[in-house]
Amino acid sequence: MIKTKKRHWFRVALGWEHSVIPVIFPRVLLCAAFAVIVSVCHHFGLKVSLPFTDSLIPDVVLGLLLVFRTNTAHERFWEGRKLWGGLVNVVRNLARQIWVAVIEKESVDREQKIAILRLLVAFAVATKLHLRGEQVNSELEELMSPSRYDKLKTMNNPPLEIAFWIADYIQEQYYRHRINIYQLSDLHKLLDTMVDILGGCERILKTPMPLGYAIHLKQLLLIYCLYLPFPIVKDLQWWTGPVVGLISFTVLGVEEIGSEIEEPFGHDPNDLPLDAICNTMRRNIEDLIALAPKVHSQYGSDKLA
């Protein structure tokens, strides 16, 4: 049973594990230190105070940052989550239909079904590794035969190879009269959906935010944070450094969060929990394997006849 954990408000606010503070702290420190230098110059009489262009720079920076950057990154993150949620449902449905619909006339039929059900989990694991740019590893070795595992290590797109093995099994069951034409069509449709989900994830992965926009946004943020001390040093004096540090923390933090979640398939704390999702699918399949279908041979044979 999965229990929802309610976290205390202050515990969340002061949390460190999933925060971007460790990443942006050097940048914030740099901006605050620069602001302190400006305060020192102003204190010794140097004319460093400049007019505050409140209608130009802040609007451009915050508009690009908080609207376009955040919305685009969150859209990619949420689309990735919907795709993986869809993969969980398709794997469950395909596993259930194979386990119940495919007729068992020989003892080897049950063994083949168990092997194929575990290949469904292997498809999800292989997709995870493929999206992360990682090689086939022991996570997949225990979900398939040694010969298939060795074959998979030589493939450029392991999930597609696994999908081919599943399709080959489904077609074989039709030729062996273990399923009828309607069941064959339904199973292939579910398998096609799995491949479509793989393609959707690859589209997110291989279509990053345009580099030119990312560079321009970071340059604009840098200009904004370094310009900020000049219009406020006259009024804030020695408070300029802390105030600039706080504002820099705000805008740089939002930008960094967008950078993390725009590629949602990695290992960052704010990325999608793909390991947990794959483990959930594996537990579902093992639970299904533990159940013995009550209606098989006679009813299925009559229907096929």
Image (cartoon, helix red, strand yellow):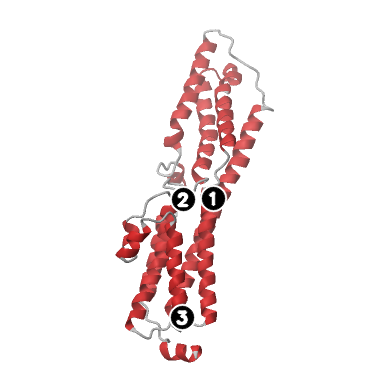
Task: Name which quarter of the figure residue 182 lies in.
Answer: bottom right
Residue 94 can be seen, yes or no? yes
Residue at the image point whose x is 51% and y is 83% from the top: 180
Classify 10 Å Cα crowding around label 3: few (below 14), some (14-19), many (20 and above).
few
Instruction: Tell me the distance, in whole angstroms, between the alpha carbons under discs 1 and 2.
Output: 9 Å
In this view, the residue farthest toward the top is 45
Tell me the kind of residue under disc 3: Tyr
Task: Name which quarter of the figure residue 233 lies in.
Answer: top right
Instruction: Please state which of the two labelled residues, at mark 3 or mark 1, is closer to the viewer.
Output: 3
Residue at the image point whose x is 35% and y is 84% from the top: 106
Tell me the kind of residue under disc 1: Ile
Instruction: Please state which of the two labelled residues, at mark 1 or mark 2, is closer to the viewer.
Output: 1
What element does badge 2 sit on? loop
Foreground residue among 46 and 73: 73
Position of residue 298 measured from the top left corner of the image (x, y, whole percent): 43, 91
Q: Earlier in the sequence, mark 3 or mark 1?
A: 3
Q: Earlier in the sequence, mark 2 or mark 3?
A: 3
Residue at the image point whose x is 32% and y is 59% from the top: 150
Foreground residue among 253 and 76: 76
Classify 10 Å Cα crowding around label 1: few (below 14), some (14-19), many (20 and above).
some
Position of residue 161 measured from the top left corner of the image (x, y, whole percent): 43, 62
Q: What residue does disc 3 label?
A: 175
**Residue 265 disc label:** 2
In this rendering, the answer to whether 144 lies above or below 111 is above
Q: Do residues under tags 1 and 2 come within 8 Å of each other at their CB atoms?
A: yes
What element does badge 1 sit on? helix
In this rendering, the answer to whether 114 lies above or below 196 is below
Q: Do residues under tags 3 and 1 come within 8 Å of each other at their CB atoms?
A: no
Tell me the kind of residue under disc 2: Phe
**Residue 204 disc label:** 1
Residue at the image point whose x is 52% and y is 30% from the top: 248
Q: Is residue 99 left or right of residue 111?
A: right
